[in-house]
Amino acid sequence: MSDTDARTATEAGDVTTATATEAGGATRPSPPSRPTRRRVLTVSTAIAATSVLWAPTPASAAPAAAPAAGAEGGRRATTWPGRVSANGWPVLASAPAHRVQGAGALTVRLAEGDAATVLLHVLRRYCYEIDMLAQHDVAGHTTDRAVRADLESNRLSGTALTIREVAYPLGAPAGNGMGAEQITVIEDILAECQGVVAWGGETSPLKQSHFQIDVPPGDARLRKLVARINGWSEHPGQGAGATDAFEPGRISRARKARNAR
């Protein structure tokens, strides 16, 4: 496995990626030691889906989807019937495209406001610390109500996105998905977001490509996180692009947050 040769310092900083192939294990190894430079991995091979339905979080207040014809990836598609998505946000007819700062021309369609601020922060950290993404790697808001698990309905409200869904499909076992170093970065992002963001790598069935807002509209935790992110944007050297997820203190914090979820 190779390390990248440069650390990103600013939002518009150049990101140099390196590729590595890793056969991920079903169990998570002990936290890696702090590297001398940021580690960036590429996508592992996707495999077929399994057959367990995701249990929504307490924020999920919407009705279950109704059966629909057709199946994809070994899981029967259903039609989401509600006016709100599983995480309690209103379904949208459309959502604006937002540019991901520091990621070239990359854009993603998300609900306007606080949800977009948080999910764009997640995307920026992914680009800076795991791998720079192309436009076809990212999908946000959709009007397609066909879902194979309730968590997929959250894209209808523009409060969820997927990163390389083809590589990390619904139900793919963790052992054939992201590597340990990628997961270290993602767990640090989740800890930083303090319960506001959920990752499909911790749901059943798994969907490691999926990230969503996991609190309802107007939640105080969301407002607090947005204020922090906006504060980082105003002070160079803080926030996305200035974070080392492999620092021992951050690894310890991420582990505690994971155990509390």
Image: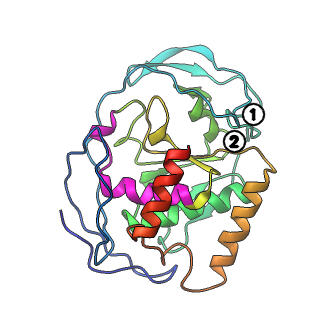
Q: Nearer the viewer, residue 82 or 184?
A: 184
- Horizontal and vertical percent position of residue 48: 31, 28
For the record, the magenta segment spans: 173-191
Taken as a whole, is the magenta stretch helix, strand or loop?
A: helix
| Number of residues whose C-alpha sits closer than 10 Å to that of mark 1, classed few (under 14), some (14–19) or many (20 or more) | many
Q: Is residue 106 visible?
A: no
The residue lying at 45 percent from left, 21 percent from top is 52
* Residue 156: in magenta span: no
The residue at 70%/52% (across/down) is 111
Task: Check whether the beta carbons of the residues at disc 1 and disc 2 lie within 8 A of each other.
Answer: yes
Dot 2 corresponds to which residue? Answer: 157
Coordinates of residue 27 in the picture (x, y in percent): 30, 40
Amino acid type shown at disc 2: Ser
Left or right side of 9 for 212: right
| Residue 189 falls inside the magenta stretch | yes
Q: Residue at horizontal 60%, vertical 58%?
A: 193
Under tag 1, what secondary structure?
A: loop
Q: Nearer the viewer, residue 7 or 97?
A: 7
Residue labelled with disc 1: 84
- Considering depth in this image, is 46 or 129 the residue closer to the camera? 129
Residue type highlighted by circle 1 = Val
Residue 111 visible to the viewer: yes
